[in-house]
Image (spheres, helix red, strand yellow):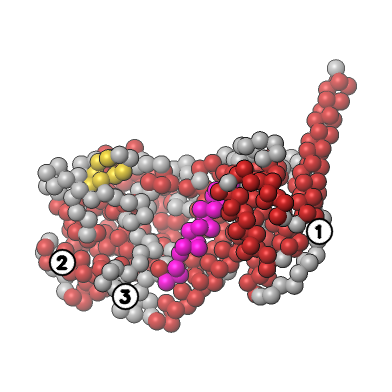
């Protein structure tokens, strides 16, 4: 039922947008396109880049933004572990796989296809180019599919406007060697495409096309500027299983698997510059709005980095302790299974003391992170609880001032797992003893529960 409703919503977006743009509507063919989009967006590893995301990004005002959003995440190689079978046939004439990388076919191999050439021109991609997942591969391939799908219904100039919106969603791009932003380079390529393909745009129209692309691209990453850092972390937790598929195996992913997902996200946020998240072109958005977006993004990233740092320290302790049992221990073995309604099970937090903070909080950042750890993010995720009781116990015991040095030691341990006992010896003895005791009590509770099952079985017999 949900699938049908999403396909109906997608079809309505396609039909109304094409009608607003004066295009030709063919319901049976548009039904096939809606099914293609929704089936792809409902892939098994899509947690954040879902159908709901494309509807949110597109909004409901501008038909070109709506159409661009429907297609902009259709290809997501890292998440889907390749290109969906349903859409691969549309791309095969233009790209090939070479040594596990996608490459644009050489000029002699490419078909004489006007829509493809238009998309390549807007992106600035040339024959023989090796595509990178981190430099427009997904957006380019998504735009190619959009152009081919919409070709029967809309003129080339409109498809070029949609393509510009999709190109602008390539995220986190630094300035070019000449000091130009990604959006300024897009403007230049649109000027060239207008000339080369006789699109008929005026200079003012090209400026508006770029401004529209900026609006869509900024809406695509608007969660970075959430006014509530908890909302930002909710989205972060939805992103992690998309590229760490082990997390989708609830209650069976390993301690190391969970740690690696935290490491990836913490490493990414440490690398990311807030100024690269949002885009601006000719006062779209205006200076004050843009400055506020950057400021909120900077604050959310700082919160997330400290939060993830504490979580990494926690998982380092649990991973080091797990090595006393084996090398691929499920996290649920160390912490207990995620609780489900109607089924009571013991968890590690049941055996940890409710400790008061041993050290004063020095900043609003520390207070906010402690609240996020103790009270939790806004939402539970499918693979994790929203609060962090073990992390809360640890940070109340050691204080935030120790996190930087502690995290360095944890990173050294991650790089050399044989140093697990050395890492544990660095930690505060009472913290390790309390957590170790808690894990042992958790094991004892399982032993007791198992014994009760045995006793009942014998009585029944």
Query: Label 1 crowding class (10 Å Cα cut-off): few <14, some 14-19, many 20+?
Result: few
Residue 402 quadrant: bottom right
For the record, the magenta segment spans 258-275
Is 301 on the left or on the right of 289, as rendered? right
Q: Is residue 439 above or below residue 304?
A: above
Q: Position of residue 132 (x, y in %)?
A: 32, 51
Q: Position of residue 339 (x, y in %)?
A: 70, 44
Q: CA distance from mark 2 to mark 1?
A: 65 Å
Which residue in the structure is indicated by mark 1?
Answer: 354
Q: CA distance from mark 1 to mark 3?
A: 51 Å
**Front position in the image: 328 or 303:** 328
**Front position in the image: 153 or 420:** 420
Q: CA distance from mark 3 to mark 2?
A: 18 Å
Q: Which residue is depicted at the point 35% across and 48% down?
A: 75
Which residue in the structure is indicated by mark 2?
Answer: 192
Q: Which residue is depicted at the point 63% across and 62% down?
A: 405
Q: Earlier in the sequence, mark 2 or mark 1?
A: 2
Q: Position of residue 335 (x, y in %)?
A: 71, 45
Which residue in the structure is indicated by mark 3?
Answer: 281
Q: Is residue 460 above or below residue 218?
A: above
Q: Earlier in the sequence, mark 3 or mark 2?
A: 2
On the question of residue 449 being in view, the answer is no
Q: Secondary structure at mark 2?
A: helix
Q: In the rendered structure, are the residues bearing label 1 and label 3 in contact, judged by CB atoms less than 8 Å apart?
A: no
Q: Secondary structure at mark 1?
A: loop
Query: Label 3 crowding class (10 Å Cα cut-off): few <14, some 14-19, many 20+?
Result: some
On the question of residue 247 being in view, the answer is yes
Judged by its main secondary structure, the magenta piece is: helix
Q: Earlier in the sequence, mark 1 or mark 3?
A: 3
Q: Which residue is depicted at the point 49% across and 70% down?
A: 297
């Amino acid at each position: 039922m949900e699938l049908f409703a999403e396909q109906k919503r997608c079809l309505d977006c396609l039909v109304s947008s094409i009608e607003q743009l004066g295009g030709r509507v063919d319901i049976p063919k548009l039904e096939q396109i809606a099914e293609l989009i929704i089936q792809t967006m409902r892939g098994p590893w899509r947690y954040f880049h879902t159908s709901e995301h494309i509807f949110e990004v597109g909004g409901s005002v501008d038909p070109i933004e709506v159409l661009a959003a429907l297609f902009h995440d259709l290809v997501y190689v890292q998440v889907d572990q390749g290109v969906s079978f349903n859409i691969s046939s549309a791309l095969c004439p233009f790209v090939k796989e070479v040594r596990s990388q996608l490459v644009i076919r050489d000029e002699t191999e490419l078909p004489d296809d006007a829509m493809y050439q238009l998309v390549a021109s807007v992106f600035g991609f040339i024959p023989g180019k090796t595509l990178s997942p981190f430099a427009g591969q997904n957006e380019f391939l998504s735009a190619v599919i959009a152009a081919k799908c919409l070709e029967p219904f809309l003129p080339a100039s409109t498809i070029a406007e949609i393509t510009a919106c999709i190109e602008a969603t390539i995220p986190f791009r630094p300035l070019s060697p000449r000091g130009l932003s990604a959006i300024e380079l897009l403007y230049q390529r649109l000027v060239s495409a207008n000339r080369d393909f006789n699109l008929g745009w005026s200079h003012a129209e090209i400026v508006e096309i770029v401004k529209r692309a900026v609006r869509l691209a900024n809406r695509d990453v608007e969660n970075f500027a959430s006014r509530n850092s908890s909302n930002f972390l909710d989205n972060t937790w939805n992103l992690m299983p998309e590229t760490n598929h082990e997390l989708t195996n609830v209650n069976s992913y390993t301690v190391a698997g969970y740690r690696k997902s935290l490491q990836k996200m913490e490493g990414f946020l440490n690398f990311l510059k807030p100024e690269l998240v949002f885009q601006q072109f000719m006062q779209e958005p205006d200076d004050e709005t843009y400055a506020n977006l950057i400021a909120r993004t900077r604050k959310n990233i700082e919160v997330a980095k400290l939060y993830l740092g504490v979580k990494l320290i926690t998982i380092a302790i649990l991973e080091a302790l797990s090595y006393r049992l084996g090398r691929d221990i499920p996290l649920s073995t160390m912490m207990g299974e995620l609780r489900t309604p109607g089924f009571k099970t013991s968890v590690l937090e049941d055996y940890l003391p409710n400790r008061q903070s041993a050290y004063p909080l020095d900043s609003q950042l520390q207070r906010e992170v402690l609240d996020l750890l103790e009270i939790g993010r806004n939402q539970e995720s499918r693979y994790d609880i929203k609060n962090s009781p073990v992390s809360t116990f640890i940070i109340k015991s050691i204080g935030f001032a120790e996190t930087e040095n502690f995290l360095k030691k944890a990173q050294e341990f991650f790089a050399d797992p044989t140093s697990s006992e050395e890492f544990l010896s660095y930690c505060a003895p009472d913290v390790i003893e309390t957590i170790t005791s808690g894990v042992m009590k958790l094991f004892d509770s399982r032993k007791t529960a198992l014994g009760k099952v045995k006793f009942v079985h014998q009585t029944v017999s």
